[in-house]
Image (cartoon, helix red, strand yellow):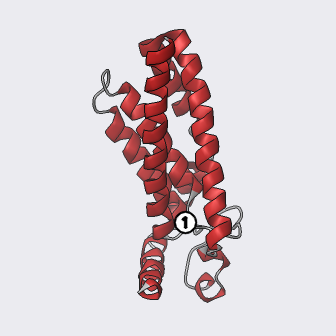
Amino acid sequence: MIEQLLEYDKSLFLFLNNLGSPTWDNLWLTITYKFTFIPLYALLLYLLYKKYGLKSLMILVVVIALMITFTDQMTNVFKRTFERPRPCGEDALIDHMRFIAVRCGKYGFFSGHSSNSMAVALFAGLLLKPFYKNLIFILMFWSVIVGYSRIYVGVHYPLDIICGFTFGAFSGFLFYKLATYLIKRFI
């Protein structure tokens, strides 16, 4: 059963990855670049400051740092535990896919980009939902775009992305609860 699921995952990867074209490559490379969204993060911090104030923002910055560290490190634990090669590292796939990323990396289960972007999307979206009710949907859509970029450039399978989203949502919600508790407790 697991083998069949992994075969479906490879087939879906090849389908989605081969939808790309050189015309769009630079856009997707920009989307997948980890520093591209610094302006978005700055805007989210500004909105949190505007709605919660400086004291709460200090707590939120610490919680965000903990959340990203936790999510990122757990991603690495999963990668080292499962040791699932990335698609770009599979000799049987490399001739049938488009690989345009800067580097491949060794293991891919699950995607750090997907887990981190979903954690940020859910965390910020839930905190700002009372003030901007649709922002959470925009942030989740952004996270899905980031996740797809990892398939497009050839470094993750769809299952890596889906599991990354799931873990990121769990992490984002967990740290949202921690942040709201700390704000109520200390502010």
> Up-down: is 38 above or below 53?
below
Residue corresponding to mark 1: 22
Q: Residue at x 30, y 23 (%)?
A: 130
Number of marks drawn: 1
Report whether residue 35 is seen: no
> Up-down: is 32 above or below 55?
below
Residue situated in front as seen by the camera: 48 or 21 = 48
> Up-down: is 179 above or below 175?
above
Instruction: Tell me where residue 62 appears, x and y as whole percent.
Output: 61, 27
Residue situated in front as seen by the camera: 145 or 118 = 118
> Up-down: is 76 above or below 39?
below
Instruction: Tell me where residue 122 appears, x and y as whole percent.
Output: 41, 40
User: Which amino acid lies under the numbered mark 1 shown in the image of this protein?
Assistant: Pro
Q: Is residue 101 left or right of residue 174?
A: right
Query: Could you say which quadrant of the image residue 74 lies in?
Result: bottom right
Q: Residues within 10 Å of mark 1 (few under 14, many from 20)?
A: few
Q: Is residue 158 left or right of residue 71?
A: left
Residue situated in front as seen by the camera: 91 or 80 = 80
Furthest residue toward left = 133
Report whether residue 131 is seen: yes
Query: Could you say which quadrant of the image residue 181 lies in?
Result: top left
Q: Residue at x 58, y 84 (%)?
A: 93
Residue situated in front as seen by the camera: 56 or 185 = 185
Instruction: Tell me where residue 79 appears, x and y as whole percent.
Output: 64, 65
- State which quarter of the image contains the N terminus: bottom left
Could you tell me which secondary element the residue under label 1 belongs to?
A: helix
Instruction: Tell me where residue 94 appears, x and y as whole percent.
Output: 62, 82
